[in-house]
Amino acid sequence: MAPVNVTSAAGEPAFGEFLLSLRRAAGLTQAELAEASGVSVRALSDLERGRARASQRRSTEALADALGIAGDERAAFLDRARQGRLRGARPGVAPGTIAMLPTAVPALVGRAAELDRLRSAARAAAETPGGVVVSVVGHPGVGKTSLAATAAHELRGEFPDGCFSLDLRGMDDRPVSPRAALDLLLRALRVPVQQIPLGVAEQASLFRSLLAGRRTMILLDNAADETQLRPLLARTTGCLTVITCRRALAGLESGRWIWLNPLSRTDAASLIGTIIGAERVRAEPEAAAELAELCGNLPLAVRIAGNRLASRPNWSIGHLVSLLRDEGTRLAALSAGDLRVRPAFEMSYQRLTGDARLVFQRLALVPGPDFGVEIAAVATGRPEARVRQDIDELVDANLLQASAEDGRYSYHDLIRLFASERLAAEEEPDDLAKMRCAVVGYLLDRAIEAARWFFPEVVDAPGVFSSRDQAGHWLDREASGWLAAYRSAAQHAEPRRMVDLAEAMHWYSDVRQRHVPWDEVFELGVAAARELGDRQAEVKLLNFAGWARYMCLQDSEGGLALHEEALALARRIGDRVEETWALAYLGVVLMRLGRPHEALGYSRPAAEGSAELGFWAGDWSIRNGLGQVLCAVGRPEEALAVHRDVLAGTELHRAEANPNTYLIFRGLTFRHAGVALGLMGDWADSAWAHHTARTLAGEAGDATGAAGSALAEGRAWREAGEYSRAIECLLAALAEFTEPFTRWERAQALAELVLALEASGEGADAGDHRREALVLCGQVGTEAAERLAAELGRA
């Protein structure tokens, strides 16, 4: 049966303990003190063993005389006896059962906010009718008991009538029953065994009546569920009940909640330092950070790793990191003495229903960090309605966590490894391979279907998606999943599916340049095409990979090499379409490299051959590229003529395009026209062209594109002397350029704003903007950023 631990008032010894310490200090036996005071040996024994709370006043004075105590010590002795007699007016804490609370963690790291909430609850308990109940909930190993025990030790002075601690053994096959728990608590309150009621309701009623009017704290550790807990809640003013549980306890009628998450990486690394010494962490800071990450920042795992290092002073942190990198052995390696991670997970797993266990295992098949019910149903082979119920059970058990986005779920990293272990142990290898294939295939096929909605000439596509917006939402939401499935296909030799997906993603990548590592997607596609011996796919994907290099990674040299390779291969196999694209890409890359006259030698023949592609499939894009190159070589009038011709084409072919495509592509063309007009010195018309581009991008839902046009419009209005319009546009751009990947655009917008403010006579407001722009230029670190920083410095 689980023991109950109790501390006395404010941590002070009870009267009997005080008497015992004084007798021993005086060097007297019980018999000698009995003879000197006239108090019987039996009465002394009852006092010292806690069977009696205090002696009567006359006996207390006789004991003080016999012990030879006087002054303040005598007054304290008499007062302790008086307090004991007052508490003895009704059953109270039996000193004979006094023991320490669960051990407090010597250095509790990263839980300051949670401790503050428990301190607040302790203060509120004194005034709240019915007391305060706080549930500390979280993953196995997240540190629930450590937090609760540390708080109990700190706060016990707030509860002079006792602090109780009871382990409810909620993860055992047979948790402590409410009746057994109440029996232990009532005994601790010195209710004679023969007077403890047999029924739970009567026990609970007596328990609450005994605590009424008292200031007590009760720690109910490792609770099983609401049924076990309800009878144990004192619900009396002055009582703080702290519960720790792995389940959510959603059925409790009232209370406060503290949801414990894994530590931050910084706190996890600090915890390692408290165990092995800060100097070892300072010697290997990167290894310490990786060790924390491999432990999933889970306090139990971090402590185990720290203990292993502490017991092996000659090990480097890097050595333990190398042992933990292998996912197949990580859980086994996370053990130190009798501390292990895996048993903490196993206890929660064993309490699941059979269906929930199956779902818990099979969800490990889902690639990527998170998933929705749709993918879970595919992985588990169960209807969505059923799997939703099982997921709820797993979330309640804290074996899955609900993500910030509604309807999304994820494992803690170490729990995912445990789920994978259980899956491998309980499924046949052939069945496991088929299930993995089904999940990967579903994600890739669905991603290909969704991506095809972004082809310029697709107005309607059969399948599960009814619109481009719906398809885009799926691709955005499931990006981590389909990308992980794509990588899995690379590991398991599925080149055909990889090529199909990489080809399908071309136009989607154009509108989501920053969201996915497109260089990896297209370069893996190139490798898959080569494995298949598919030269047409290879040359197409070489062009896509080159685009990703220069557009997404700002690696123009890398892009140049890939497009040169694509051009040579296209000519070798006679692929006119990809030859045209390679020429067009080379023109853009060479222009970016500051070689515009060479670029023109590629862009002009590309534009001449682009009509073969069809207008929306690339003709407009390639001719716009020619216009950009013409601007770069100082021929903006010719460039403007090209862009105006493209604008006429967007209207002529409007019916052939997806409406979103029309808006985006027409907006881009207006933006290019605005650049040409600016180079011609026609700044007002340039501003209006950029304004049109901004409006079209906004209608298409392209917030980043609209911000880019707002920046260009603001620059044009400033050059035109329309400073108030310029400032409005630049502030609008800054409101959107807030992400790390828009640092360069933000720096440019800030620099333009500084110039506009100074030109408008509001230069006093420009200082902060200049400083931020200089900081951002330093972070970006490109040649263009250095030039901009020099200009700002001179200004």
Image (tube, helix red, strand yellow):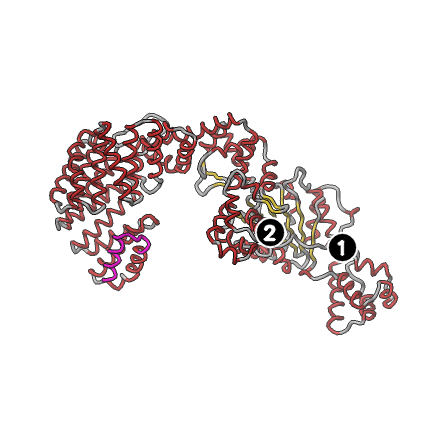
* Amino acid type, callout 2: Ser
- Which residue is depicted at the point 72% across and 55% down? 98
- Which residue is depicted at the point 48% across and 48% down? 290
> Which callout, 1 or 2, points at the residue further toward the start of the chain?
1
Q: Where, by quadrant of the figure, is residue 225 drawn?
A: top right
- Please state the horizontal and vertical placement of residue 396, each as a whole percent of the image: 55, 39
Could you tell me if the residues under marks 1 and 2 are in contact, i.e. CB atoms within 8 Å?
A: no
Alpha-carbon distance for marks 1 and 2?
38 Å
- Please state the horizontal and vertical placement of residue 753, each as a whole percent of the image: 25, 56
Mark 2, Cα crowd under 10 Å, few <14 / some 14-19 / many 20+, is few
Is residue 273 shown in magenta? Answer: no
Dominant secondary-structure state across the stretch colored magenta: helix
Report if residue 790 is visible in the image. yes
* Amino acid type, callout 1: Gly
Front-lying residue, 238 or 554: 554
What secondary structure is found at the residue carrying circle 2?
loop
Q: Which residue is mark 1?
A: 96
Which quarter of the rendering shows the C terminus? bottom left
Compared to 247, does 189 lie above or below?
below
Q: Which residue is mark 2?
A: 311
Front-lying residue, 708 or 776: 776
Is residue 794 shown in magenta? Answer: yes
Report if residue 261 is visible in the image. no
Magenta stretch bounds: 778-795
Q: Is residue 570 left or right of residue 395?
A: left
Q: Is residue 372 left or right of residue 118?
A: left
Instruction: Report the disc number at residue 180.
Output: none
